Image (tube, rainbow, N blue to C red):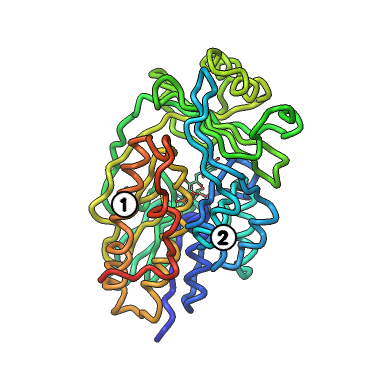
Amino acid sequence: MTALNIGIVGGGVGGLAAAIALQKVGHRVTVFEQASRYGRVGADINLTPNAVKVCDGLGIGEALRQHGAQPTHRISRTWDTGEETSRLEMAEAAVRNYNAPQITIHRADLLEALTSRLPAGVLTLEKRVATVGSQAQGASVRFADGTQQDYDLVIGADGIHSVVRAALFGQDHPEFTGLVSFRATVARDKLASLPNIDAFTKWWGPEPSIQIVTFPLNRGREQFIFATTAQDGWRDESWTLPGDVHELRRIYRDFHPEARALLDACTEVTKSALYVREPMPQWSQGAITLLGDACHPMVPFMAQGACMALEDAVVLARALQGVDMPGVAAALARYENTRKERTARVQRGSRGNEWLKQGGNADWVYGYDAWQVPLAD
Ligand code: FAD
């Protein structure tokens, strides 16, 4: 077999994971990331056992266990009375049931663990891709600085506003959910008096769209807070735009005092509108394919966005194992056929926003093993 020369657009969670996995099966990869450095932007990433299994196989499991936190339980509570409607054991139970824990980690720590597994020269920062195009053989990447590179295969791992997706299938038309979300991290010592602070807790509001989620990050030194509500005026979809902590407190002022105490401790918050997109019928064209948010962006109510991108990366690398140029189309079909049904189910389940509200069986999500799942022809 001749190693494929693969260009990856986007050095986020899925792009970096794909680079490691593809190198493991013998291909040559280059990752192009538009950011000039990985700062401590963004906040939480929730890695359920299905994603931790991916990370263990990529060789970053130890780093995640060191930097992340492992919530003891997954608790559902009612917004005003504080009544607990479900409590699932997480830490040891996840290892017992699924052979891996759940780890909550700052996105920056996850990216650092991933980049540490890449040899020098694989990742090029500050290189924005303008578009991609098919060639008679392979595909080309055109950069915003006017230069161009040709590859045997190009992977669009460039997130929700993917230029690769737009080049293949045109601009998407996401549907605004009518909801906005707030994200914040708070030093844990500000919340020391609150109960259940080591758990993943979801406060279900008077309607499912109004909710507050909280869990520990960074070895328990930080607490992450995520809240959603209906709001019409704000339409920006962004991971980094600042919101207003006073507005945040005002919206949830009738919640239980323990939920309000979380918001009182916030000094900064980001705000984003939430959009939904239908599952895409096709992810690949010629020698170009997509992974992660570029092909199945989802609202965060099942906390599976990063987990699905990590699973994609491993399945794509397995589908390309031992493949050279003539086999690329069949390998991409194998990848899509293995992944599309599962990611569509998670996209729709996230939109439904009922995940584990009354307990229930999480095996089909958490029990998946991307390293072992049979590839579908
Ligand atoms: P992402 O992790 O979003 O990665 C996409 C990457 O592609 C980014 O690094 C982006 O800079 C790069 N990119 C985009 N366009 C181009 C281009 N034209 N040329 C080159 N590079 C490009 N999720 C959460 O759950 N919580 C968070 O707090 C959170 N914070 C985030 C902060 C940032 C700055 C970003 C970009 C994403 C954040 N996410 C967050 C999203 C989360 O990482 C993804 O939903 C999930 O991990 C799926 O991964 P992905 O690789 O598909 O996309």
Q: Residues within 10 Å of mark 1 (few under 14, many from 20)?
A: some
- Nearer to the camera, 82 or 144: 82
Q: Amino acid at mark 1?
A: Ala
Q: Which residue: 55% across, 16% down? A: 247
Which residue shows up at 44% across the image and 48% down it? 159
Quick one: quadrant of the N terminus?
bottom left
Name the element at disc 2.
strand
Q: Residue furthest right?
A: 189
Q: CA distance from mark 1 to mark 2?
A: 22 Å
**Where is the C terminus found, in terms of image quarters?**
bottom left
Mark 1 highlights which residue? 167
Residue 373 quadrant = bottom left
SS of the residue at dot 1? helix
Q: Residues within 10 Å of mark 2 (few under 14, many from 20)?
A: some
Outermost residue, left direction? 281
Coordinates of residue 340 in the picture (x, y in percent): 30, 56
**Earlier residue among tags 1 and 2:** 2
Q: Is mark 2 within 8 Å of ligand 1?
A: no
Q: Residue at (52%, 38%) from the top-left corner?
A: 87
Q: Amino acid at mark 2?
A: Thr
Q: Which residue is mark 2?
A: 124
Quadrant assignment, res 250: top right
